Image (cartoon, rainbow, N blue to C red):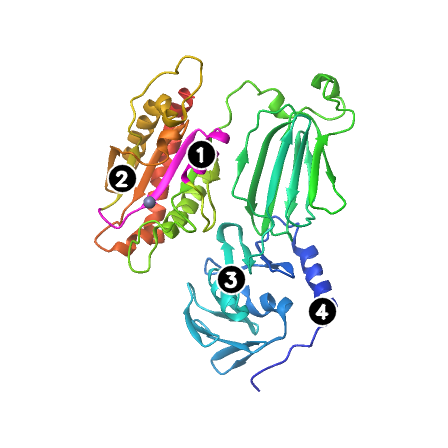
Amino acid sequence: MLWSERPRLTRAALLAAVLLVLLATAPSAEEKQLSVYGPQVSYSLPVSEHNGQDYVALLEVLEPFGNVSAGAEGEKWKLRFNRVEAEFRQEVTVGKVAGQKIGLPAPFVLENNRGLVPLRALPTILGLMLGTKTEYHEAARRLFLGGAATRFTSDLREGGLSLNFSAPVNPLISTEPGKLKMTFTRDPVVSTAYLLRPENSLVSLIMFSEDNGQAELVVQGRMPLLARFAADRKTIDIVPAPGEAQSAPAAETAVAVPPPPTLQSLTAKPPFVVMLDAGHGGDDRGALLSETLEEKAVTLAFARRLRNELQGHGIIVVMSRDADVTVPVEQRAAMADASRVAVYLSLHAASQGRGVRVYTAMLNSQSDPPGGFLPWNTAQARYMLSSRALADIVKAELGKHEIPNSELPAPVQPLNHVAAAALAIEVAPSGADVASVNSGVYQQRVAVAIAEGVVVGRSRVEAER
Ligand SMILES: [Zn+2]
């Protein structure tokens, strides 16, 4: 018998089951999870590893959406969802979904009659089975279906911060001294702005990040903070905690709650943060590197590898984009400046040439103009020495890793506008084969070398901030 029907679940029972899965998996930091956000239902599922690759059980992924059944037939494992079929074979990297042949990045795994597919293939498989648009944030394991997204804006005034969401949200809120953390597991909260360091008497930092099927919004205060939900759960007001009237000196309130660390470091330098700006994205595809390879995809994949490497060295990283979205060039520079990053790396890819080209802005170095304002067009001028020094160091590290490299000044946007050590890095193929520019092994080698360059160059960059 081909199709072994699973016991049918009512919609309510199913939702309850999904909730139970959520409750069971959400808080564990160690366990890898995937979150799927659909227009009607959002849920999380455990992710398992096989041969170093992430997998999910396809039947469990589809269950919340409708009738699904699956079973083995000889060598084949077949799944039927509503009227759509999928077919895979144990240890084979090709499958058939909705009549279409698809390649898998790793072999299909059949384990205790559960068919497991590589996580990286899931967006394609679900897109075909559900007939919907998918957007996958791979590094964070968050999969958005049919354009599901909750966006937010922040309205910061003296004495209060309002976060306004496009749909009701239910974050888990936790507080640490001087810090308020909102964790979104079931809400498809997304953002392109990642880090803000406002000049404000109440709030010193607003940071959005996503990881392991969750999104996190951290607000750091210059005094203890409290979050208040509006009745529609679309607005969260962040205000001083009771007894924290703005006129009260912080020292006197330290009895109840330790003052935030920022109080001691208000006059100190902002932390060492590296911004990775994956070139192009969304409507802007960048160069067509080969018939099928778009620059915007290569820059994002490379940015994620470089982020991992830098984070491995304990460096804080912010990204101008972590998805295939359009971000105007001026906005990228503005994000770097608003986040007061120490290093800004604009990442590009090319089909011509070999190895890595490192660019610095075409400006003469200059000291601060009278009045202390940095003119927007030449914000980079003050950092030129720092940028060139970092370029030299990165170039040397690439050389140590035997990656062909060159260094040159060029009018690459938006380097001139960035008030930080700023480089543009263009990754070209490792050899004659253009596709090598998208090879994981090669990208990893380049990422390791550049991350080491940043580590070595850090003290030099810090000296000029
Ligand atoms: Zn480019």
Q: Which residue is mark 1?
A: 274
Sequence-first tag of 1 and 2: 1
Residue 18: where, in percent of width, then height? 68, 62
Q: Which residue is mark 3?
A: 133
| Residue drawn 39% across the image and 32% down it | 455
Question: Which-is-in-front pick, marks 3 and 2?
Answer: 3
Q: Which residue is mark 4?
A: 11
Residue density around tag 1, few if under 14, some if 14–19, many if 20 or more, within 10 Å: many
Residue 354: where, in percent of width, then height? 23, 46
- In the rendered structure, the answer to whether residue 296 lies left or right of residue 225 reads left
| Residue drawn 61% across the image and 43% down it | 152
Question: Which-is-in-front pick, marks 4 and 1?
Answer: 4
Please tell me which residue lies in front, 27 or 434: 434
Q: Which residue is mark 2?
A: 357
**Dot 1: what SS?**
strand
Measured in 3D between alpha carbons, the distance from the residue under mark 4 to the one under mark 1, in whole angstroms, is 46 Å
Queried on whether the Cβ of the residue with tag 3 lies below 8 angstroms from ligand 1, the answer reads no
Q: Given the image, on which type of amino acid does mark 2 rest?
A: Arg
**Dot 2: what SS?**
strand
Q: Given the image, on which type of amino acid does mark 3 rest?
A: Lys
Measured in 3D between alpha carbons, the distance from the residue under mark 4 to the one under mark 3, in whole angstroms, is 24 Å
Measured in 3D between alpha carbons, the distance from the residue under mark 1 to the one under mark 2, in whole angstroms, is 19 Å
Q: Which mark is residue 323?
A: none
Is 183 one of the magenta-colored residues?
A: no
